[in-house]
Structure formats: structure tokens, C-alpha cells
């Protein structure tokens, strides 16, 4: 399928690993001029080189923390006028006892998972409106819709992001600018691997990737029967970044193998 985005400028904020990188690859494959960000330089630069070589694409790496004003300004300077913007960001790790979460913990969660994406969108939306076209895709979490007591540092801030984008997307759709959110369930990514020790401690498991993965597969009742990998999300992200999604506005699409049981 031709995504019709050849030659467009695309930002994948959080594009050096996991679902962000997989999305960046689908966009590069479709012929965009790509800008990818991350906090850690070495992995970012390697990812940009690999993606560029694999797809013959122009890929610019920008070291930028999306949760910090300085990082956002670095992104804005490097790519002032994107047609496509996809954002993912890592919130603080899974929490323990909810009674022990402090205002500082909540501020850290909100700075990363809510204010970071909002500020990036707020900066780019006026230009997209003026140019008459734009696509924004947030890669958030299904715990925004399916609350989990141990994911309070991720879910509530993303529920607020869904609320914000529900309103803003209806306001800007008339200018050809769409915002949609993807809500991933259990994915085996680099980021999930980094949290393995935390999960192993929380669920009293042996700290081995296969043990932790099997625990999630078995205990979270994923109807599809497996923990996904990043390529299970990227094609949908790329579709939402394309003109083909022109009638999809303000949606929150769960990609979780059927784990969240509901009609909508
Ligand atoms: N994996 C899962 O099972 C799962 C489940 C539900 C929701 N999610 C959500 O899905 C999203 C993607 O997860 P993933 O597992 O693909 O993560 P991942 O493998 O850790 O990849 C995250 C990417 O974003 C970058 N990044 C993170 N925080 C950033 C920041 N503040 N500023 C700029 N770049 C940042 C990372 O690079 P640096 O670290 O170098 O910055 C990396 O390139 C996250 O929002 C996560 O909360 C994941």
C-alpha cells in the first residue's frame, strides 16, 4: 500500500528504540525526510545511521529530552516545519504502594507523559494549520484506558493526554490536521527489557526476560496469546501518519492483542 507520504517531513520523537524506532522505520521506508530524537546520544546516532542506510532515507538525529524545555527547543530548531509528528516518551517506572507516591513523583509523571507531548504539539500545530495538512500520532499506553494500580505514573497522565487530544483534534481537523493516539498493551521492547528487574521484583519472579514475559502472557490474559513486538504497532502508526487517515480524528486505538475487554 502506498502511504502517499514520500517527500514529507516527519518527526519521530523517541525514535531510537522500541515502538518509536519501528515507526520511524515504516516512515523512512515510505520515503519521508526523517528527524528522530532521544535522550541517549549513542543509540540515537546508531539508529539514525542504520535506518538511513537500510531505506536510503535522510535521517537526522537530535539529542533532545521531550520532557524538558531545552530539549524541545533543540527539536524545534532542528525541524521547524514537520508535516508528520509522532511522539513517544518514557514515564517514570512502575510504582509500588500507591500511598507512597509523592507530589514530586506526580510532577515527574506529568512533566514527561503529559506536558512534554502537549508542548511539542502546541508548537507545531499552528504551522500545520497554515500549511493545510498535518498528522500527529501519540504512542501512549493502554493503561490510560485500562487502569493498573502499579502503572499510576503512566496511565493517569496519558488519560489526561487523551482528554486534551480529544478536544484539540476536533478543533483542528477542519484544517486537515489530525491527532490520534495509539494505546499499546504488552510489548517486548528495549524499554520493557530495561524494566525487567523492576517487574521481576514486583511480581517476585526470577529476573530473566523469558520468565517475566511468560508471567505477563499468562497472567494478563492476552487473547492473541503472545507479548507483541514493536512491529506489531508500527504499521498502524504509519497509516495514521498518512493522508489515508483523513477521516480518523481524535481516536484512541488500543493495540493489545485483545487484553482490554470492551466493545469500544
Ligand atoms: N513496552 C510496553 O510493554 C509498553 C506498554 C504500554 C505502554 N508503553 C508505552 O509505549 C511507549 C513506547 O514504549 P517502548 O517500550 O517502545 O519504549 P523504549 O523501547 O524504551 O523506546 C522509547 C524511545 O523513546 C525515547 N525516549 C524516552 N523518553 C524520552 C524523552 N523524555 N525524550 C526523548 N526521547 C525519549 C527512548 O530513547 P532514550 O531513552 O534514549 O531517550 C527510545 O528511543 C512508551 O510511552 C511506553 O510508556 C509501552
Image (tube, helix red, strand yellow):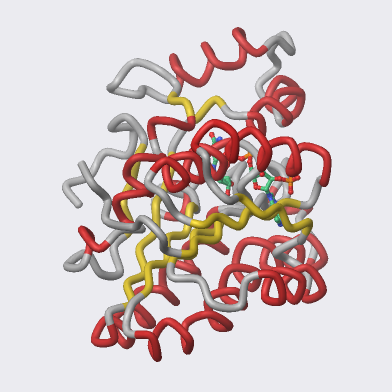
Would you place residue 163 above or below residue 9 in this image?
A: below
**Quadrant placement of the N terminus:** top left
Using residue 23 as the reference point, say whether residue 192 is left or right of it: right
Which residue appears at 44% of the width and 37% of the height? 185
Which residue appears at 65% of the width and 13% of the height? 209
Tally of marks: 0
Percent position of residue 65, x then y = 76, 61
Percent position of residue 142, x then y = 43, 46
Would you place residue 243 above or below residue 224 in this image?
A: below
Which residue appears at 32% of the width and 87% of the height? 171
Looking at the image, which is closer to me, 96 or 223?
Answer: 223
Using residue 174 as the reference point, say whether residue 147 is left or right of it: right
Would you place residue 70 above or below residue 12 in this image?
A: below
Percent position of residue 6, x then y = 36, 55
Using residue 248 as the reference point, say whether residue 25 is left or right of it: right
Of all residues shown, which one is farthest toward the front?
Answer: 56
Using residue 207 as the reference point, say whether residue 227 is left or right of it: left
Amino acid at each position: 500500500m502506498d502511504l502517499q507520504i514520500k517527500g514529507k517531513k516527519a518527526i519521530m520523537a523517541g525514535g531510537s528504540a522500541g515502538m518509536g524506532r519501528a515507526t520511524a522505520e515504516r516512515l523512512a521506508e515510505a520515503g519521508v525526510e526523517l528527524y528522530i530524537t532521544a535522550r541517549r546520544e549513542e543509540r540515537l546516532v546508531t539508529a539514525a545511521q542504520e535506518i538511513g542506510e537500510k531505506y536510503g532515507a535522510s535521517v537526522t538525529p537530535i539529542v533532545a529530552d521531550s520532557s524538558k524545555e531545552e530539549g524541545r527547543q533543540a527539536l524545534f530548531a532542528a525541524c521547524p516545519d514537520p508535516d508528520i509528528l509522532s511522539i513517544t516518551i518514557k514515564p517514570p517506572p512502575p510504582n509500588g504502594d500507591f500511598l507512597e507516591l509523592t507530589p514530586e513523583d506526580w510532577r515527574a509523571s506529568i512533566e514527561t507523559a503529559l506536558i512534554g507531548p502537549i508542548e511539542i504539539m502546541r508548537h507545531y500545530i499552528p504551522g500545520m494549520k497554515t500549511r493545510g495538512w498535518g498528522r500527529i500520532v501519540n504512542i501512549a499506553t493502554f493503561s490510560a484506558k485500562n487502569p493498573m494500580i502499579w502503572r499510576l505514573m503512566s496511565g493517569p497522565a496519558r488519560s489526561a493526554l487523551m482528554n486534551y487530544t480529544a478536544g484539540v483534534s476536533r478543533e483542528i481537523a477542519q484544517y486537515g490536521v489530525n491527532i490520534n493516539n495509539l494505546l499499546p498493551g504488552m510489548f517486548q521492547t528495549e524499554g520493557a527489557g530495561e524494566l525487567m528487574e523492576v517487574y521481576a521484583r514486583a511480581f517476585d519472579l526470577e529476573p530473566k526476560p523469558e520468565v517475566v514475559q511468560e508471567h505477563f502472557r499468562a497472567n494478563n490474559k492476552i487473547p492473541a496469546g503472545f507479548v507483541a513486538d514493536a512491529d506489531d504497532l508500527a504499521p498502524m502508526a504509519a497509516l495514521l501518519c498518512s493522508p489515508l487517515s483523513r477521516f480518523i480524528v481524535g481516536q484512541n486505538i488500543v493495540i493489545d492483542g485483545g487484553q482490554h475487554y470492551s466493545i469500544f
